[in-house]
Amino acid sequence: MEKLDSSNSFEQRPTILITNDDGIEAPGLKALVSVLVSTHQFNLLVCAPQREMSAVGHSITWRRPLSVKQVDMHGATAFVVSGTPADCASLGVSSVLFPSVPDLVISGINQGSNCGYHIVYSGTAAAAREAFLNGVPAVSISYDYYGGLNSEQLEKMLRRLDAKAKTQDHASAAKTCLPIISAILVEIKNQAYPQGFFLNIDLPRDLANHKGYKLTKQGKSMLKIGWRQITSSVQGGKSLSTVSETDASSISQENLLFCRELRGFKVDNDESDQKCLQEGYITITPLGALTHPDNDCQAYFKDWLPKVAQQMRYRDD
């Protein structure tokens, strides 16, 4: 396989735009930038949200201007943005913030997997999708950082982790992604990379013993989440992490408070992204922007819709 030449001049290097939904200070983004900088093979741009924007989906900012500020980030030209992940991707590829369109957009590395129906909610996937909608090759990368842990194990892990430990773990994830990132850019350079999709990549928790790449399809796995009523925003804990401190403090005592709670997890039995990820593979899932029904319902509606129209005519008569 052809490799990128690290001796290329700055102008000849491919340009990568990096964004995410965990925010510009997230360990996944910092680790990815650091690893890519260390190769001396890429021009790096960063355009990322100023705060965590997990699970905002493909929302965009429409009725107010975005606030954008340049920040220091070693080896990259970086901006922090007041908007959503999709806003960041759109602005980053627009040639308004940066002087040229990047060769590749990478969204991530997300702290947690994005498979199955969760892709609908994912700001990480949305940023890559937004780049794809603007005609720029894109990849979303997620790391199943907490995969396979029960609640007790997860609690212990969170207690022992600090920012440095998280960054080191995500650096391993970034290094694991280097071969496929380089291979994509070679194909783009040779004008051999196909269009009409973006890639969603999920990395297993046990990176040291991963089973290699696995081409998968989006499955129907998802968390089963319910609601419970609480008496204060503090009681809601991390479930209210997307509510700002100002929002939480301004909630009147007259308001009812509810937070989400995890009640289970549904996984597909076929060769879907989530199942293969749990088996230890690095899953590679091509995705698009069209939303097709899960089941073929065309035949049903071809029969049903004329009956509805006929009933409407009867009422008019």
Image: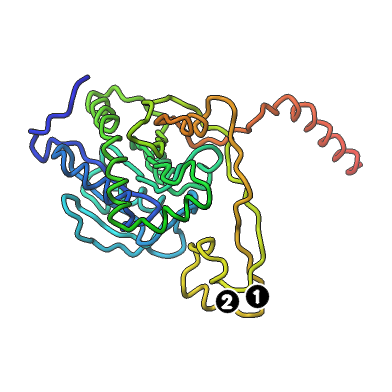
Residue depicted at 78% across the width and 33% down the height: 305
Q: Nearer the viewer, residue 112 or 8?
A: 112
Circle 1 residue: 255
> Badge 1: how crowded within 10 Å, few (<14), some, or many (20+)?
few
Residue depicted at 27% across the width and 63% down the height: 69
| Residue 314 point in image, percent of width and height | 91, 39
Residues at circles 1 and 2 in contact by the CB criterion of under 8 Å = yes
| Residue extending farthest top | 1
Left or right of residue 67: residue 242: right
Residue depicted at 33% across the width and 49% down the height: 28
Residue depicted at 54% across the width and 61% down the height: 239
Q: Is residue 224 above or below residue 184?
A: below
The quadrant the C terminus occupies is: top right
- Indicate the secondary structure of the residue bearing disc 2: loop
| Residue 136 point in image, percent of width and height | 33, 37
Query: Disc 1 residue type?
Result: Asn
Circle 2 residue: 251
